[in-house]
């Protein structure tokens, strides 16, 4: 708290209005004193709550990347990820895009829409695309994220901005929280087991209009039996896409309400980048530098290195920096050529790679081997990505 003219604080101590603490039974408290008491208390409590709701408390169920700050699958803050028509693909960490026929799109990192935000996600239907089925941009929740919402109503906030050629009828963007009772997984267009629509908010955005904050509360409590959940943004484009048929999305938050009374969604709960980045590595990890989009032949920087100790055999055992949420799929990538082989720096040749499918592949470790080394003391490089996404 800071001392200010209207609130008599001394450091962290509140000082009552003069005349208030000295009044005893039977005394007359002047109206001016009474008014000051109410005014000061009201202002003090408002300041207190404003301070509390702005403190980072990890209350956002989308704490890993609700603010679109982490982009491992792309080139970090310069990420631009193409998603082909009729494709489901992860883009910003934890967020996937589902396109329909003739809806080739790009999801890219853009400047944040709010104070404190570094990046937002822009989803754009490529110019001249004609697909007009619903597009889904979604965040499926994992078990630990779901449990923090069960048995409570939830509140939702997000900040969005429509591109100049935003095409949906009436500019409608819909945010929906689906929950169910089956195994954790993506929902997309297939309803969950025992599905409930916990929250649905439709907002009409003006093409090229101002940044808009969307807020809302669920009408019912999230069932205590919930084991599946996914937050979706959906919209249905119209006609042929212009150059900016796009939507920018930032600072998405789902939080459990702590009381049954009318609830005002709180400020965005912004964690530091390291915490978000490390948490996202439970779902995805790459050996490439953060600012390098993972691809065969993209870069030798960050590649794993090994010196062959025997002819016809080499390998490396790797422990993931963060224990992943489940045993991941692992893909090897040549640092210098468009294939999945080891690059033999000594000979200039490639050596075929194999991800060991035995016990060394787990939620914590993997081993990448080759049986095509021509001699000992040769230097080999390789990259890999590990995906344990929902």
Image: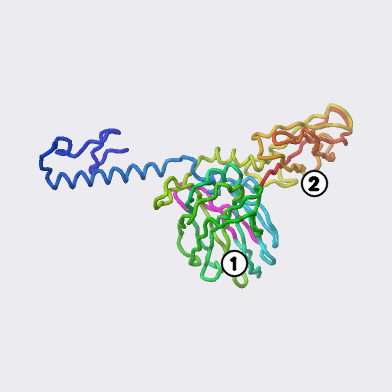
Which is more toward the observer, 221 or 388? Answer: 221
Residue 120, horizontal then vertical, whole percent: 54, 52
Q: Which residue is mark 1?
A: 236
Residue visible at 53% across and 55% down? 198
Residue 73, horizontal then vertical, whole percent: 65, 47
Q: Which secondary structure, mark 1?
A: loop
20 magenta-colored: no
110 magenta-colored: yes
Q: Left or right: where does residue 181 sit relative to residue 150?
A: right
**How far is the residue under mark 1 from the one under mark 2?**
38 Å
Residue 178, horizontal then vertical, whole percent: 58, 55
Main SS type for the magenta part? Answer: strand
Q: Left or right: where does residue 5 sit relative to residue 337?
A: left
Residue 189, horizontal then vertical, whole percent: 65, 60
* Numbered label tally: 2
Which is more toward the observer, 148 or 349? Answer: 148
Mark 1 closeness class: few <14, some 14–19, many ≥20 residues within 10 Å: some
Q: Left or right: where does residue 194 sit relative to residue 42?
A: right
Residue extending furthest toward the bottom: 239
Residue 326 lies in quadrant: top right
Residue visible at 10% across and 40% down? 27
How was this image coloured? rainbow
The disc label shown at residue 339, or none: 2
Residue 165 lies in quadrant: bottom right
Residue 127 lies in quadrant: bottom right
Q: Which residues are magenta?
A: 105-123
């Amino acid at each position: 708290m800071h001392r200010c003219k209207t609130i008599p604080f001394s450091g962290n101590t509140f000082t009552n209005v003069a005349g208030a603490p000295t009044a005893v039974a039977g005394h007359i408290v002047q109206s001016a004193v009474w008014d000051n008491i109410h005014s000061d208390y009201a202002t003090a409590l408002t300041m207190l709550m404003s301070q509390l709701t702005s403190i980072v408390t990890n209350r956002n169920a989308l704490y890993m990347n609700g603010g679109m700050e982490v982009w491992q699958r792309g080139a970090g803050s310069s990420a631009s990820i193409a998603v082909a028509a009729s494709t489901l693909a992860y883009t910003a960490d934890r967020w996937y895009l589902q396109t329909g026929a003739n809806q080739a799109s790009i999801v890219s990192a853009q400047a944040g829409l709010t104070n404190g935000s570094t990046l937002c996600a822009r989803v754009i239907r490529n110019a001249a695309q004609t697909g007009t089925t619903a597009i889904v941009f979604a965040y499926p929740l994992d078990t630990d994220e779901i449990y923090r919402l069960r048995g409570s109503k939830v509140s939702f906030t997000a900040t969005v901005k429509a591109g100049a050629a935003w095409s949906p009828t009436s500019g409608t963007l819909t945010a929906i929280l689906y929950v169910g009772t089956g195994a954790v997984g993506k929902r997309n267009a297939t309803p969950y087991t025992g599905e409930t629509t916990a929250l649905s908010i439709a907002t009409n955005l003006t093409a090229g209009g101002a940044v808009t904050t969307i807020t809302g509360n669920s009408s019912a409590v999230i069932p205590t039996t919930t084991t599946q959940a996914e937050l979706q943004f959906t919209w249905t484009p119209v006609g042929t896409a212009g150059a900016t048929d796009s939507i920018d999305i930032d600072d998405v938050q789902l939080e459990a309400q702590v009381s049954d009374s009318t609830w005002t969604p709180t400020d965005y709960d912004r964690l530091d980048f390291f915490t978000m980045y490390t948490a996202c590595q439970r779902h995805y990890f790459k050996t490439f530098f953060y600012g390098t989009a993972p691809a065969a032949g993209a870069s030798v920087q960050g590649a794993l290195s090994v010196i062959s100790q025997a002819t016809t055999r080499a390998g490396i055992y790797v422990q993931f920096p963060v224990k992943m949420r489940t045993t991941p799929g692992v893909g090897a990538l040549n640092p210098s050529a468009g294939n999945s082989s080891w690059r033999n720096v000594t000979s200039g040749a490639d050596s075929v790679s194999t991800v060991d499918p035995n016990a060394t592949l787990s939620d914590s470790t993997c081993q990448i081997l080759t049986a095509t080394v021509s001699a000992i003391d040769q230097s080999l490089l390789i990259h890999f990505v590990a995906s344990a996404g929902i």
